[in-house]
Image (spheres, grey):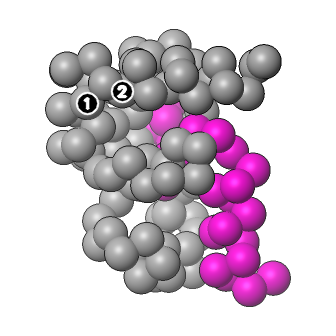
Amino acid sequence: MDIIKKIENQIKDNVILIYMKGTPSAPSCGFSAQAVQALSACGEKFAYVDVLENTDIRRELPKYANWPTFPQLWIDGELIGGCSIIIEMMQNGDLQKLISKTINKYNK
């Protein structure tokens, strides 16, 4: 499968998806650890892709997303941003609101 198609399918098939270094239980960088902690605090399940184990995705996703760094949080097919944006949204309550609104949309 073409790597861009694979990325598009991952984003389409997972309502909440984080591309990160490592796994949620064992992040391999501080930024991924902070992002996962903020995301986990919202209380909803999310999917992840370890870009250290998927070098083709690590190479191509920044070009596809026009976002150069990891982690990358995608919600409902839209790129939300990286660690600093995730933390800021968590601190001002916007992350929880966005996730709740998105989950409610799919649970109707």
Residue 58: which numbered mark, if any? none
Query: Tag 1, which secondary structure?
Result: helix
Query: Looking at the picture, does residue 68 appear above or below residue 89?
Result: below
Q: Which of the pair 52/79 is nearer the observer?
A: 79
Q: Residues within 10 Å of mark 2 (few under 14, many from 20)?
A: many
Query: What's the amino acid at mark 1?
Result: Met
- Residue picked out by circle 1: 89
Which residue shows up at 57% across the image and 80% down it? 56
Left or right position of 52 against 93: right
Which residue shows up at 50% across the image and 53% down it? 78
Q: Is residue 12 magenta?
A: yes
Query: Tag 2, which secondary structure?
Result: helix
Query: Looking at the picture, does residue 23 appear above or below residue 67?
Result: above
Report which quarter residue 53 is drawn in.
bottom right
Which residue shows up at 58% across the image and 39% down it? 16
The percent position of residue 29, horizontal first and vertical second, equals 29, 49
Q: Quarter of the image for the C terminus: give it.
A: top right
Query: Looking at the picture, does residue 72 appear above or below residue 37?
Result: below
Report which quarter residue 94 is drawn in.
top left
Q: Quarter of the image for the N terminus: give it.
A: bottom right
The percent position of residue 73, horizontal first and vertical second, equals 43, 47
Query: Looking at the picture, does residue 88 appear above or below residue 1?
Result: above
The percent position of residue 98, horizontal first and vertical second, equals 44, 27
- Residue picked out by circle 2: 95
Magenta-highlighted residues:
1-26
Q: Which of the pair 107/4 is nearer the observer?
A: 107
CB within 8 Å, label 1 to label 2? yes
Query: What's the amino acid at mark 2?
Result: Leu
Q: Which of the pair 25/82 is nearer the observer?
A: 82
